[in-house]
Amino acid sequence: MIRNCFVCGNHTQHKCEVFYGEFMQIQDCGTLHIGICSHCGYIYIMNPLSQETTNDYYRTNQKHDTTSVNMDSAHAKRSQKQARFILDAIGSIETVLEIGALAGGNLNIYKEMGLTVCGTDLSINNVEYAKRQYDIELYQMDFDTFYVENNDCFDLVILSNILEHIIDPYSMMKKVAEFNTNYVYIEVPGFDYKYIDMPYGMFIPTHQSYFTLESLKNLMKCVGYELLDANLLLADGEQHQSFNTPLMQSVWQRSERYEVKRKPSCLKTTISSEQHLDFYLNSSKLLIENIAGVIDRIPDDLRLAVWCLSRHTALLFQHTTLSKKHIVKFYETDDIFHGRIIRGRKVGYFSKADVEQNNIEAILISSYEHQNRIVSQIIESGVNCEIITFYE
Ligand SMILES: [Zn+2]
């Protein structure tokens, strides 16, 4: 268990545990312990997955590959918006490095402006696509390998949705500062303004570090940077806002004003990181109590199917009476779970025939983000059974 703050070195507090158990696609992430440093406001997982496990996940996870990301016009539009925000805040630059550059579409914006660009990504598909499509060289390596092998300096370093995956963000930013001449862009899921969505939804096993503007500012002060501008990206166009929205965008510049030291005098905000975290944990608790009430009212002998084996289902088993209900079947769209037996019940695809064959009387949708899509699928199938949902 990591008990000292990576950012400022102070002793931290254990705030709560979130249990995900056997319902995750990644091994060894049964219970997440959430900690906070009251001094600098840094929120983190006290028992993180190893950096290697996280990197492996992103090396192989298709969602982060070219096929879905690069063709997506919403993503291209967001890259343009991000570039405008950065370029408005900074002075002139010649070189850009993006860590975790995906398929290079983002870097291509800067290349087309005549700047020299370079990037890293873990996925070989992304690296090959960037070369083929944009003639951009990406290094297929993790950040630490790049740090050892790199001899160049960069005027702007882009870290978009990277820092939340890092166990020790202080060490990473200290290394970035060694090869950055002037500006850094950081985009992370933020705690300062948060929609109420699924309970504890912010805490996903591949996110090791969580930031408010307060804690990010303290981190960057420790490595000698000051804030030029910050912004909240409030929506991604989806009806249901997921764990990673809103996003916090921020641009930083090296500053001679700050003496680079491990324990800075910390900026105080009117609402502290700790208060943001406490409010979030409280609203999660209330939300899960409401869900528990809905589950209590399900008759114990009702033949039930549960749709979605996810961290959400793990929460329901831990915090509600779901395990006492008459679950006949689990449905799951993702074939990673298929053929498995969970809690003594088979996992399979949903079909009208399966519902009828198993005399299922109700389907409980255990998902925040996919709820509406699943409900539509059930209705379109023409199956005649009750649908239980938890979210508007
Ligand atoms: Zn701290």
Image (cartoon, rainbow, N blue to C red):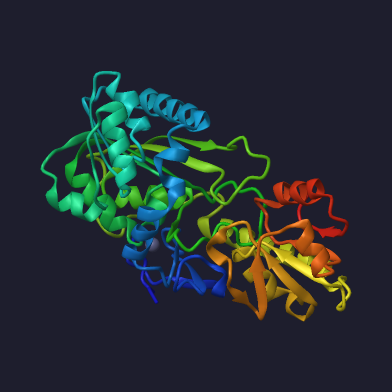
Residue at 24% in and 23% down: 115
Residue 361 figure quarter = bottom right
Q: In this view, does 282 lie above or below 194?
A: below
Q: Is residue 297 depicted above or below 369 in this figure?
A: below
Determine if residue 100 is in view.
no
Q: Which of 179 and 79 is in front in this view?
A: 79
Q: Quadrant of the N terminus?
A: bottom left
Q: Residue furthest left?
A: 151
Q: Residue at x 58, y 58 (%)?
A: 334
Q: How many labels does the image show?
A: 0
Q: Where is residue 363 in the image (x, y as percent from the top left)?
A: 79, 62
Q: Nearer the viewer, residue 272 or 325?
A: 325
Q: Does 25 appear above or below 182?
A: below
Q: Compared to 279, does 82 lie above or below?
A: above
Q: Where is residue 6 in the image (x, y as percent from the top left)?
A: 33, 63
Relative to 61, 237 lies left or right: right
Residue 57 in the image: state x and y as whole percent. Answer: 39, 59
Residue located 28% across and 50% down the image: 173
Mark yes or no: residue 277 visible: yes
Residue at the far top in the pictured view = 113
User: Along the horizontal axis of the image, is 259 left or right of 189?
Assistant: left
Left or right: 377, with 64 as reference point: right
Quarter-of-image position of residue 380: top right
Figure quarter occupied by ligand 1: bottom left
Expressed as whole percent of the image width and height from the top left, the position of residue 333 reads: 62, 56
Q: In this view, does 231 lie to the left or right of 314?
A: left
